[in-house]
Image: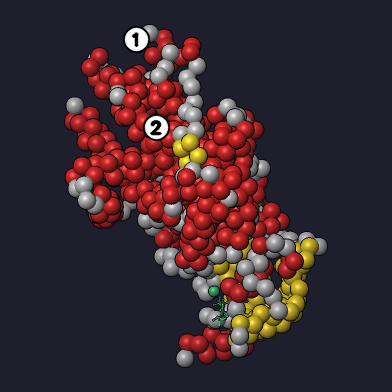
């Protein structure tokens, strides 16, 4: 064993064992890191192995994962509800589209504007949301989503009305040697990684604990010094901002925006995707993104007439089999695998 | 340290507190007793700004407590436990305790989202302090367990740990040993005594368990139907005819 591996795996090193046992011990102690490394490798190699349409699909998974990450912050972590997150997604998408179309800004430069506008709107709507809870909050946020489509159509001169806006996709820099779809994928991947890292940092600080405390017991949270109005409003704003970021990357990816892409159905799909993926977990938004992108296209293959029916039925099935969502199911599977491994180790 | 005067709280037709007044000196341990519905929890809820008082005042270290914001109570050095447990069920025991230390942190959304070094330092500091509290209350073993699913006696200790993480000068305990076995009650009494000595905390405790109250309180206040009917040393209050009457009245 070299010096560096000794330092990296002190626990595995401590076990008196042969080479074979060493490997297994290493696998058990470090499986999370190994799994993460394998995932990173797969995620980076995928666009080189797949046809452009498949790469496009994966890019859309990332777009939805970011939107769901934002929704999860509000719903899964802070325990509030939003049936209108499609509206913030649309605001991000249109902000980017208009800046690209009318002002010719570079794609990446549109991102902070999309994020900022969605954040400000989220902040503005977070204030009335303070006074509401449960069903009332659901209705008000739903109303926002309903209002949005006619609003976009009304301001035709800026938004292109019902016809929408057609845009250019980001051009990959020559030094990368990447194709258009691959470049887009990596842009989306970078945004997704940053968004997840940021939310992860937030959740393991006192901010994340305050949100969880509000979700679990508002009165006790307040007695412990958590200022409810501050945390709820900012959770709303951050959540909206992430949806706006997702909308912006959506615009880069599709290179076209039209009001009919942002109907109430989008908001409801987002919430359904999150619940199926798993509320309140880091993996939930990714699994939800996979579900939202792949299930409709799979169900189209199964039944051409009614993909919506298959989608809906699958949501029901997942909720019956795994009430904590796919992330909960995966967690349970990982725990039982670990138990089996541990038992094996004891017997060995 | 705490001066309550003429405190009155009404809910519709019910007068839950009716002109209650008493004071607690620094370092004292005061028992608050009285039959169910006497208004003891309502008094705590007033002091921690869960309820608004209709009349009266509550002064705490020269501050008008009744004008403080509900979330500002912890930063004033006041912590409480709840009669029916007010924990965060999905959070681990450690995170429950860490929420108690919330007001000692500064981290905001942006700083935490950007992984700023000062946020990480603060987090390390809060965690070390929380671990010390967990250790003191013998909760280290269950620190990573979600609060939901732990035995009731343990949850009572977790709530005390969370209150201590506030680093309070005034601690309000609402029926801390209700539902515990007699062995656990004695342990809890020893724990409270020890904490009081070590940390120099003033305590007001609501409790029906007379043995517990008599063994750890310096002074006892008795409420009945929202009025103060007796106040004095544990012995005096226990022998007070009005107190005996109040308790017999409910027992009958
Ligand atoms: N939020 C509330 N709404 C209406 N009545 C209440 C409320 N809280 C307490 N009360 C009433 O106030 C009285 C005192 O209750 P409480 O303070 O809980 O008594 P104790 O803690 O001494 O058993 C009771 O009659 C109770 O029903
Ligand atoms: Mg009570």
Q: Is residue A90 left or right of residue B224?
A: left
Relative depth, front residue between A33 and A307: A307
Identify the element where label 1 is drawn: loop
- Say which label, 2 or 1, has the lower sequence index: 1
Up-down: is A216 above or below A326? below
Where does the image place residue A322, in percent across and percent down from the top left? 28, 51
To which chain does the residue with label 2 belong?
A
To which chain does the residue with label 1 belong?
A
Are circles 2 and 1 on residues that touch, CB within 8 Å?
A: no
Where does the image place residue A150, in percent across and percent down from the top left? 51, 56
Q: Is residue A58 visible?
A: yes
- Which residue was labeled with disc 2? A59
Where does the image place residue B119, in percent across and percent down from the top left? 62, 35
The colour scheme of the drawn protein is: secondary structure
Mark drawn on residue A211: none
Relative depth, front residue between A53 and A193: A53
Which residue: 30% across, 20% down? A49
> In the image as oriented, which residue stretches furthest toward the right?
B62
Which residue: 63% across, 79% down? B222
- Which residue was labeled with disc 1? A1
């Amino acid at each position: 064993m070299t010096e560096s591996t000794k330092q990296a795996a002190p626990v595995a090193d401590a076990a008196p064992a042969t080479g074979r046992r060493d490997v297994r011990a290493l696998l058990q102690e470090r499986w999370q890191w190994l799994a993460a490394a394998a995932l990173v490798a797969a995620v980076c190699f995928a666009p080189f192995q797949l046809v452009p349409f498949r790469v496009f699909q994966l890019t859309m998974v990332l777009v939805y994962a970011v939107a769901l990450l934002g929704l999860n912050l509000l719903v899964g972590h802070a325990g509030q509800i939003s049936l209108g997150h499609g509206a913030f997604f649309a605001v991000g998408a249109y902000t980017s589209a208009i800046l690209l179309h009318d002002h010719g800004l570079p794609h990446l430069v549109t991102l902070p504007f999309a994020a900022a506008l969605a954040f400000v709107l989220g902040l503005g709507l977070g204030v009335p949301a303070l006074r509401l809870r449960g069903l009332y909050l659901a209705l008000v946020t739903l109303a926002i989503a309903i209002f949005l489509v006619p609003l976009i159509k009304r301001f035709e001169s800026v938004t292109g009305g019902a016809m929408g806006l057609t845009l250019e996709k980001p051009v990959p820099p020559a030094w990368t040697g990447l194709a258009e779809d691959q470049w887009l994928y990596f842009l989306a991947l970078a945004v997704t990684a940053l968004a997840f890292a940021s939310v992860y940092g937030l959740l393991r600080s006192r901010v994340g604990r305050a949100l969880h405390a509000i979700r679990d017991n508002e009165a006790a949270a307040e007695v412990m010094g958590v200022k409810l109005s501050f945390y709820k409003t900012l959770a709303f704003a951050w959540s909206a901002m992430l949806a706006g970021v997702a909308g912006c990357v959506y615009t880069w990816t599709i290179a076209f925006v039209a009001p009919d892409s942002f109907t109430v159905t989008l908001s409801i799909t987002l919430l359904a995707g999150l619940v199926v993926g798993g509320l309140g977990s880091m993996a939930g938004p990714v699994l939800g993104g996979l579900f939202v992108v792949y299930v409709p296209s799979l169900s189209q293959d199964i039944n051409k007439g009614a993909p919506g029916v298959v989608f809906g039925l699958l949501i029901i099935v997942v909720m019956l089999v795994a009430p904590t969502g796919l992330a909960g199911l995966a967690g349970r599977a990982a725990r039982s695998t670990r138990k089996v491994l541990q038992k094996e180790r004891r017997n060995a | 340290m705490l001066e309550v005067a003429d405190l009155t709280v009404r809910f519709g037709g019910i007068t839950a507190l009716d002109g209650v007044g008493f004071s607690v000196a620094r370092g004292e341990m005061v028992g608050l007793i009285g039959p169910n519905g006497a208004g003891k929890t309502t008094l705590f809820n007033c002091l921690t700004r869960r309820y608004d008082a209709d009349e009266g005042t509550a002064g705490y270290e020269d501050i008008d407590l009744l004008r403080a914001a509900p979330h500002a109570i912890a930063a004033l050095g006041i912590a409480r436990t709840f009669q029916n447990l007010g924990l965060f069920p999905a959070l681990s025991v450690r995170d429950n305790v860490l929420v108690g230390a919330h007001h000692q942190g500064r981290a905001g959304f942006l700083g935490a989202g950007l992984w700023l070094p000062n946020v990480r330092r603060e987090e390390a500091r809060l965690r070390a302090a929380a671990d010390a509290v967990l250790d003191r209350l013998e909760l280290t073993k269950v620190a990573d367990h979600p609060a939901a699913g732990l035995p009731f006696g343990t949850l009572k200790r977790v709530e005390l740990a969370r209150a201590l993480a506030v680093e309070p000068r005034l601690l309000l305990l609402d029926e801390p040993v209700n539902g515990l076995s007699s062995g656990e009650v004695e342990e809890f009494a020893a724990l409270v005594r020890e904490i009081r000595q070590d940390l120099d905390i003033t305590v007001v405790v609501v409790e029906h368990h007379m043995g517990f109250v008599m063994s750890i309180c310096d002074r006892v206040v008795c409420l009945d139907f929202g009025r103060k009917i007796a106040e004095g040393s544990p012995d005096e209050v226990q022998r007070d005819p009005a107190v005996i009457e109040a308790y017999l009245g409910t027992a009958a």
